[in-house]
Image: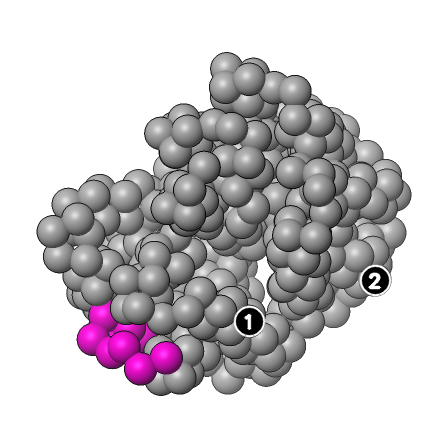
Amino acid sequence: MGAGAHGSSRDAAAVYGMATASALEGIRPAGLGGPVSTASPRMLSLSFMAIMGGIGAFGPFLGLVLDRLGHSAAVIGGLLALVPITRIASAPLWSLIADRYRVGARILQAATLTTTLVAVAVASGRLGAIGLGVTLVVFAFARAPIGPILDGLTVRALEARRGDAAGYGPIRLWGSVAFLVMAGAAALVADAVALPTAPMVLAAGAWAVGAVVLLGLPGGEGGPPVALGPALRGLAARPGIGLVVAALPLHGMGLNAYDSWFALHVEQLGLASVWTGVALAVGVLMEVAVMAVGGRILARFRPESLVSLSMAVAAVRWGVTALISEPWLLTAVQALHGVAFAVFWVGVIELFRRASAPEIRASAQAVVMTACYGLGPLLTSVVGGALVDDHGTGALFGAAGLAAAVGAVLTAVGGRRLRPVSG
């Protein structure tokens, strides 16, 4: 296929890959099971590295791989659209199961093994469009609980060891490092190796390592099912929580616009595609730096203030992105990813940890994933479809800036009314 088709595939891959990577980062269930003392910081860091490293090789390059296997751009777009749709439906289901039956550790192990097998199936290059559709639905269904449960295990282990979750960032940052390294490695093998599915082989290898590491997790706590209804109704009735939840898709719209449309934006500005890679690298490095000091940030600021601040900074980021074309300045602005994403994620994890009763931590955090990384990408697609053809990608980023500004106001108002359930 021609260069235009390959460009479309890369853009479609970014829609899927970066949104999936984003979706891995912030949900914490109470129903993890087992004595958390066995989940050491080193084990948790290795788990993040393997799982997010696999995402770095799989997500951004899936569309390119499908293109090289001979599928049309329309088929590729349809296949990739299956992932966020399935995730919206499956994330709350998995979280409710993990909370109610306290089997989160077993779900995490099974889900990681399943995603490994999916990568192997795609890497085989033998699946047709229908087979790939079924496989990607299975992938999305299995992928949905991995982020929530791994983050939840991290939070529980930290609470057991030190009484709070302030050490989450220094553990989670290794996932960001691995994502960047594996994405670079996948880019190299995609061009240097004759095998068209080479990035999928890297992803399968990383996830296989993660599956082995996660075999060391303890099993479920056992006991009778947990009654979730009263606690869920209590969360929904809490003052301010509705405004915060309403702000999440507005913020997610901008994050997904960056992940999905930034490469096309760079192309429309007439810049070399290398600037896309440089901007992504700058953003991830700033994300790692902020995660490393996440505990210090939480010690000084309320989580709802951090979430509101991150949305305000995102509004500036997307607005400037929409208006400028100088490559160095455009790249420098993406350093705000350290606030617009990393500060947001550290803050929103802590906000919902404090806002939810222990028995519904997974279910409460599933709201974050569904709103920000399920509804957010769908909102991006709708707005992008309405604006980009006639007005260019700059209009999409301008709309994302306005949405983030509204989200900042909603979070600021709702955050003032929130009171923590847990410390």
Q: Main secondary structure of the magenta part?
A: helix
Q: Nearer the viewer, residue 167 or 126?
A: 126
Residue 225 place in picture, x, y as percent: 63, 25
Give the crowd class for mark 2: few <14, some 14-19, many >=20 residues within 10 Å: few
Image quadrant of residue 161?
Answer: bottom right
Residue 373 place in picture, x, y as percent: 41, 47
Quadrant of the image for the N terminus?
A: top left
Reading the chain from its start, which is encountered first: label 1 or label 2? Answer: 2
- Examine the structure image and report whether residue 322 is included in the region drawn in magenta: yes
Give amino acid for label 2: Arg
Residue at 56% x, 46% y is: 61
Residue topped by disc 2: 42
Q: Nearer the viewer, residue 33 or 129?
A: 129
Residue at 60% x, 79% y is: 289
Q: Is residue 71 above or below residue 286?
A: above
The label on residue 281 is 1
Quick one: SS at disc 1?
helix
The label on residue 347 is none
In the picture, measured across the screen, residue 266 lies left or right of residue 190, that is left
Residue at 47% x, 56% y is: 352
The region drawn magenta spans: 317-327
Q: Is residue 136 above or below residue 181?
A: above
